[in-house]
Image (cartoon, grey):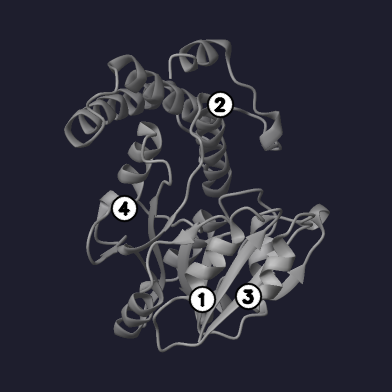
Amino acid sequence: MVSFVIRTKNEGNKIEKVLKSIRFQKTREKIEIIIVDSGSIDSTLNIAQKYDCKVIKISPDTFTWGYALNIGVRNANGDIIGIISGHCILIDDYCVERICSAFKKDYNLAAIYGRQEGNNSDDPFEKYNNSKYYPNVDGLHYLSQEKNYGTTISNACCFLRKLVWNDVKYDEKIQSCEDAKWADEVISKGYELAYCGDIGVYHSHKLNYEYLYKKSFWREYEMKIIRKDNNKRVFYFVKFMIKHLIYDMIYWKKNLCRNVKNKQIWAYCFITNIACYKASVIKNINLKYQDISIPKHVRKVGEKL
């Protein structure tokens, strides 16, 4: 059995498409859907009942990404757990079958995460972001063997073994990046992680400059705390920024969006890299997402996007 765990709060405008994409999977496996809801007041729960979902309600005051996932997985009956966001729609009808086949071939494989595609094909920044971090490639790519895929996963679309979760639970205290911390711990115990471009979801966010800055800042900030990496110096970030600016410019021009103006590309690269730098040198370890302030020079550059 494959159990899907979906965290929701007011996902009424997307959740039916999400659930349909799961229920219409062409597979021999039984499928279970668990909704962990943190206070929806729209049509989310009514739609969930329509698709025979097991609904677990939690208080918004107790919600963290890791806490919601642990509750969902604990109540799941499947050997394989599928984790997708409440607004992420599976790309095709064979995701479950491909995933189960991959897990059967390697019992040391703890988790597989898939590609993400935007719903808005006209947004060059969303297209760039997804093609860079979630490429459309064939086959299974082990993170331990291919550096291009980093050392972490994404819970927007991820499948894992419940046996591994029994060994390594999600951190319930951190505000985000629970997937990255879980991946670190799983790797440290000798398990394998992999990326698979043959499975995935449609997942969109409007990438305006405020969202770009805050998302980039927050992920770097959380990773610094998770990995206790507080010793980076200014020269490291100068080198880091130059490297990534050059890489990003070349990538844009070679692979996509040739009609995007250079100043837009530079603005995108500048904002994301400055956000990472600011997050890495900040001293406050009790920052909340809503407290992130956008510097004036970033706002000025962001207006060019």
- Mark 2 vs mark 3, foreground winner is 3
Q: Which residue is mark 4?
A: 149
Reading the image, the residue beneath label 3 is 51
Q: Secondary structure at mark 4?
A: helix
Can the viewer see residue 262 in this picture?
yes
| Residue 237, quarter of picture | top left
Mark 3 secondary-structure assignment: loop
Considering only vertical position in the picture, is 48 above or below 43? below
Image position, residue 288 (x, y; %): 70, 37
Kind of residue at disc 2 = Glu
Residue at image location 39% in from the left, 80% down from the top: 26
Q: For mark 1, does the 10 Å Cα neighbourhood hold few (<14), some (14 to 19), or many (20 or more) residues?
A: some
Give the class, few, some or many, for how many residues have Cα within 10 Å of label 3's Cα (few <14, many ≥20): some
The amino acid beneath tag 3 is Tyr
Mark 2 neighbour class, 10 Å CA radius: few under 14, some 14 to 19, many 20 or more: some
Q: Earlier in the sequence, mark 1 or mark 4?
A: 1
Q: Which numbered disc flags the more N-terminal residue, 2 or 3?
A: 3
What residue does disc 1 label? 23
Indicate the position of residue 136 as horizontal and vertical percent values.
27, 54
**In the image shown, does 78 or 141 lie closer to the viewer?**
78
